[in-house]
Image (cartoon, rainbow, N blue to C red):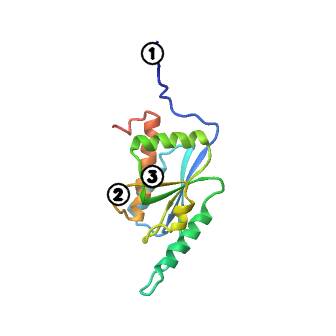
């Protein structure tokens, strides 16, 4: 008898929230629109919630290391208790769309919230990377932190659509 693989979407009795904790509060309209488009497509079972962390003031003689450390402290303070913490960093592990979908399925089964950390213009504080359960690289390219928001929202929606056999994902 042939073995069949169950390709149904994961089921949970819980609603998981994905918290996108990002440094920066004044984004261009195209960033706001792009993020809202894809975050709005995700269902309640894995709602994407943006929390903006104020960027430290940078001036000509600013202590950038201190500013990044302060931004990191504010990011970590915003992480909901008990959530899986994932630092978005170019040194992290790259995931294919299928791998992200598998991780999303696992997160949905687990039922606990997920917190994704995006640093500011000078990157993510090392304390955030140290606290993270995982490090995810969106690309080996260095991306502007504003673009990362849109890319994360789109990729999460794509992963969800793959799990649910939605026609959005055509690979």
Residue 2: % across, % down? 45, 15
- Among the two numbered marks 3 and 2 on one chain, the one whose residue lies closer to the N terminus: 2
**Mark 3 to mark 1: distance in Å?**
38 Å
The first of marks 3 and 1 along the sequence is 1
- Mark 1 vs mark 2, CA separation in Å: 41 Å
Q: Which residue is mark 3?
A: 153
For the C terminus, the quadrant is: top left
Which residue is disc 1 drawn over?
2
Furthest residue to the right?
81
Residue topped by disc 2: 140
Q: Residue at x 59, y 46 (%)?
A: 16
134 above or below 75?
Answer: above
Q: Residues within 10 Å of mark 2 (few under 14, many from 20)?
A: few
Could you tell which of marks 1 and 2 lies nearer the N-terminus?
1
Residue 56 visible at all = no
Mark 1, Cα crowd under 10 Å, few <14 / some 14-19 / many 20+, is few
Q: Marks 3 and 2: CB-CB under 8 Å?
A: no
Q: x, y percentage for residue 9?
A: 51, 33
Q: CA distance from mark 3 to mark 2?
A: 18 Å
Left or right: where 110 falls relative to 120: right
């Amino acid at each position: 008898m042939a073995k069949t693989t169950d390709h149904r979407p994961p089921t949970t009795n819980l609603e998981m929230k994905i918290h996108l904790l990002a440094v920066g509060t004044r984004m261009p309209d195209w960033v706001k629109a792009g993020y809202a488009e894809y975050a709005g497509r995700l269902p309640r079972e894995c709602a994407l919630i943006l929390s903006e962390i104020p960027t430290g003031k940078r001036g000509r003689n600013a202590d950038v290391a201190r500013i990044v450390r302060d931004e990191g402290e504010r990011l970590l303070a915003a992480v909901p208790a008990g959530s899986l913490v994932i630092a978005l960093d170019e040194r992290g592990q790259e995931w294919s769309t299928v791998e992200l979908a598998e991780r999303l399925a696992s997160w949905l089964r687990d039922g606990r919230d997920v917190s994704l950390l995006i640093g500011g213009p000078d990157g993510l504080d090392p304390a955030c990377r140290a606290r993270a359960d995982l490090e995810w690289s969106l690309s080996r390219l260095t991306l502007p932190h504003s673009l990362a928001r849109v890319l994360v929202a789109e990729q999460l929606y794509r992963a969800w659509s793959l799990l649910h056999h939605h026609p959005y994902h055509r690979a």
